Each structure stands twice: as structure tokens, then as C-alpha cells.
Image: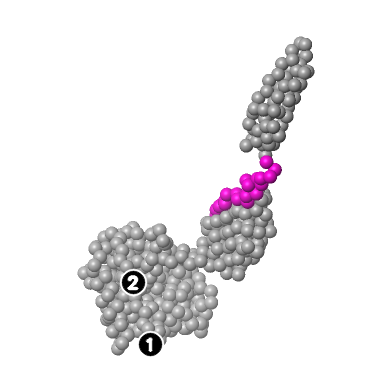
Amino acid sequence: MLVVAVAVGFVGSIGLGQMAARHVMRMDPPGGIDEAIARAQENKSARWWRAERMPILLPNPGVRNRAASAPIRPAVVERTVLAGKGDTLIDLLVRGGASNPDARDAADAIRIVFDPRSIRPGVPLTLTFGRPESADPHDSSQSRLLKVSLPTAVDQSVKIERGSDDAFNARKEAHPLRREVVRNGAVIRTSLYEDGVATGLPPSLLAELISAFSYDVDFQRDIQVGDRLEIAYECYSDASGRPVKTGNVVYGSLTLSGRMLKIYRYQPPGGFADYFNEKGESVRKALLRTPINGARLTSGYGMRKHPLLGFSRMHKGVDFGAPTGTPIMAAGDGVVEISTFNYSYGNYVRLHHSGPYGTAYAHMSHIASGIVKGVHVHQGQVIGYVGATGLATGPHLHYEVLVNGVQVNPASIKAPTGVILSGAMLKSFEDERTSTDAALASLPTAASMTRSTF
């Protein structure tokens, strides 16, 4: 602490105050403060005087100002912007507060590990601002883009960070997910799809299950009120326990008028995953039972009175009523034999499949692009769209199955199955099936969603 000795006097016959003497010292002078005050009192010009000791804190030039020398560290600031339609990565960075040069440099860095054109609308971009390591530690004005975080998938994100050399570096960061198997089910009251969705089944998995069963089940005629559906499928959760995505259907069953059909997902060693029945036979058949989704059976195979011609004749196929434009799928792998307008059949496609089998599709509004004579098609590929061309009363698909070129009742066909497991593969499948059955049996009835980690 520094001490100031002050001597104050007032002069003038009319009493105007005036400071007579002031002595400011940064340290005690020789003789001390008392002697300094005594000298001040000898000033004869002062008619009234007063001397005091007054301690005052003054800057000491011999001591460095520690507060001024400490680096200034402004608070780190985070901002999040949402990608909109048509936004580029640079647009998002600038909108979040980055300078144009920093935005360009960060965008260049991310292109090494991720294509920024893949950013979808609604994806959040988190920007972190602060003082770079290369900045002057005493300059409070330098606050720049330090980090960028961009989720690219539910289990992965891309991180961009400014290094000590002031350059941006990008890397991918994985976020491990926890796999569970979820079991659910439904009693069919209106339709398999509507009742399944109402119980919380993801529509994509429900469609996968329907596709797997479509080789053995005619969903237009075989499903009755009171039938049951059960399904077990993979569900993946993040570190907070929030479900973020679904995986494969592990198991499914349909109980149709008391008859239960089961399927299991199994991947043979060195092969591709597929669905198999309890015997180890692939559910995939040479032909689909129904080559159109969401349609209703309006006319069966056999003799009938033609709705336009007015007389009875053989109906050599089955009709599925559906809105104009509904996609029509190839019932099996094959080669296009005919693809043209065929008079009363309207727009018409005929496919040849393996062995003696063939299928035909008529009254289409138009034939799909690329479906021409000689082209190979795969099962489930869209070959045309529902319409009412030719001799038709309304939009529908006329579907025929041919054996050695002759139309037969599609319901009577027992199309050959796909892969049939045997030997070590069959034993491996049976072990996996037993494990799945045991895990499912340990769970409550699938009236409500439950989880297992098998």
C-alpha cells in the first residue's frame, strides 16, 4: 500500500478555499511522514491549515499487471442450423455464422470423407465458435469457426475440427447401437396391413413379411377376420435408449383359419439370407401367388357370363380390381415373350419362366419402360400398370398362369420351391430355429411390444 501525505490550506480575505500544498510520495521520504507534515505547516501564506495522512492504492510500475497479461478466453458458442431443400453445405455454414473463407475451407475438408450433396432436408448441423489455437491470446476480437458436427446416419456422424495449423480436418465418427429383438402381433379385424400398423408395426417390415408369405398365401382370399399375425424383428437403440432404426424380420407367423405358417430368417454359410419354413425349405417359390399389392379378387378362374359380351365362356385367368396405375409385378424370374397391344387383352405382357411355366398380364394402362421381347426380368420387378385397355369394364389386372402354353387355374399350381437345406446347413438352421423359438417362448404374448436381446 502506498501512502500520500496531504497538507491543505485556504487563503484569501474573503474565505475562498485553495489548496496550499500537496505532496504525493510513492514511499516514505527521509524523516518520515511526520517531518513532511511539519514542513508543510511552515508555509506562512496559509491562514488556516490542515494536514492528514491518507492511504491510497496507486499502480506500482514495478509490478506487472497480471490481469492484463492473462490470455482472454471468450466463451465457446454453439449454433445449430437445419438443412433446407436446396441448401449447400457452404450455405448452412454461413447461415450458422461462419465466415465465407472458413465455410469454404470446412466444406473442402468434409469432401474427403463425405459427399455434402447427400445432406437431406431437416438434418441438423452444429457449429462451434471460439478462439483458434493459432490466434493471439490477448486479442479478444478473434472468435472463429472451430468445429462442425454433421449426422450422416443414425450410427455415424462426420466431425470437422480446426487444428493447431489453422487447417480443418474431417473424420467419420461411429456411434455404436444396441441390438434388440422386438416381438409384436395383431388379430386381424379389417386387413392385415391396417391392423398390423395399428399395433405399431413399421410399415416397411410389414411389407417385407407380406412379401415373404406371398409365395404361399393369397392375401385376397386366404385372410379371414380373427386370423393372427406375429412378428419378431431387430430394433436398434442409441446410447440414450432411443430406438433409431429397425433391422430384419427374424421370425414371422400367420395363423389362417387355425393353420399356422412360420418363417425364419436364416443365412447359410457363404450364402445369402432368406426366409425358410420349419423344414428348412426356402419360402421363395418360382411364382408369386399374387402379382399385385392391395388389390381385390373380382373374378376367379372358370366358366362365367362375360360382362360385356353377354354370354358364358371360359375365364382362363383371375381378375384383380385395383386403381388405374397400380404397379404390376413379374410373378417370377423369366424372359419377356410378348409385349404389345393384344386386341381384347389390351396392353399385354407374357413371360416365360423356368421349366414349363409362363404367366400373362392383360388390360394394362401401359407397359413399363424397357419391358420388350427378349428382356430378362426378375421376380417382383414392375412390368406394367393397371388399366382398362382392350375388352374391359373397368381398371383391373387379368392374370393367367400357363403350363406348357396352356392356361391353368393359378390356385392349383404348386410352384417349385427355392433352396432346400440339407446336411450341415440343415443342422445349422435347426439349431438357430431352436434358439429363436426358445427366446420367443420366454417373452409374454405379443399383445404388447416386448423386447429381447437374443
Q: Which residue is drawn at 63% across and 63% down?
A: 164
Instruction: Identify the image quadrant of the C terminus.
Output: bottom left
Residue 165, position in %: x, y? 65, 64
Whether 5 is among the magenta residues is no
Element type at marker 1?
Answer: loop
- Could you tell me what secondary structure mostly forms the magenta stretch? loop
- The segment highlighted magenta reads 60-86
Residue in view at x 30 percent, y 78 percent: 432
Between marks 1 and 2 in the image, the one whose residue lies nearer the viewer: 2
Instruction: Give the percent coordinates (x, y) of residue 127.
Output: 57, 55
| Residue 407 visible | no
Count neighbours of disc 2 (C-alpha within 10 A) and say few if under 14, some if 14 to 19, many if 20 or more: some
Please report the residue visible at 73 percent of the width from the left and 25 percent of the height from the top. 39
Disc 1 marks which amino acid?
A: Pro
Q: Which of 453 and 382 is in front in this view?
A: 453
Q: Which mark is residue 40?
A: none
Number of numbered discs present? 2
**Nearer-the-camera pick, 428 or 213:** 428
Residue 79 among those drawn in magenta: yes
Nearer to us in this view, 416 or 85: 85
Q: Quadrant of the N terminus?
A: top right
Image height of 287 relative to 203, above or below:
below
